[in-house]
Amino acid sequence: MIVPSSATRVLLDLGDANAALLFMALRHQYKPNASFPLAKSRAKFLGLTETTLRRARDHLEVGGLIERIHQGGGGPNDPHLFRWTPLAGRRGG
C-alpha cells in the first residue's frame, strides 16, 4: 500500500497512532474513490474502544483525510459514511 506524502505528513502532525492505524486499515480495504461506512463494529476489529475509534475518526476528519458524506445515527444499521479527500490520495475531484 502506498500512502501519499501529504497524508503521511498529516498523520505525523496529528500525533495519534490510533488515527494512523484506522487510516491504514481503511486504505487497505477501500479504494481511493470509494465511499465507506465507519461503524462502531470496526472498533472491536481494530482492538480499540468505541471512544478511541471515534477520536481517531474525528482526527482523520479534522486533518482533512476523510470527509463525512452521510450523517448516520438514524437507527440500527445507519452508520456514518465517509469518502477519501484529495489529501488522502482520492483521484479526481
Image (tube, rainbow, N blue to C red):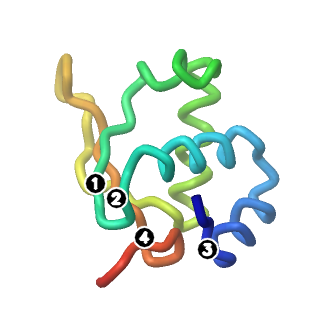
Q: CA distance from mark 4 to mark 3?
A: 12 Å
Say which residue label 4 marks.
85
First in sequence, mark 2 or 3: give its number. Answer: 3
SS for dot 2: strand
Residue 42: % across, % down: 46, 25
- Is disc 1 placed on a helix, strand or loop? strand
Figure check: 28 above or below 46: below
Q: Does label 4 or label 3 sit earlier along the sequence?
A: 3
The residue where tag 2 is placed is 83
Question: Rounded to the nearest whole Å, what is the CA distance between mark 3 and mark 1?
Answer: 18 Å
Image location of residue 70, percent across then percent down: 23, 49
Q: Which residue is mark 1?
A: 35
Q: Position of residue 82 (x, y in %)?
A: 34, 52
Label 1–label 2 contact, CB within 8 A? yes
The answer to whether the residue labelled 3 contacts the one labelled 1, judged by CB atoms less than 8 Å apart, is no
Tag of residue 4: 3
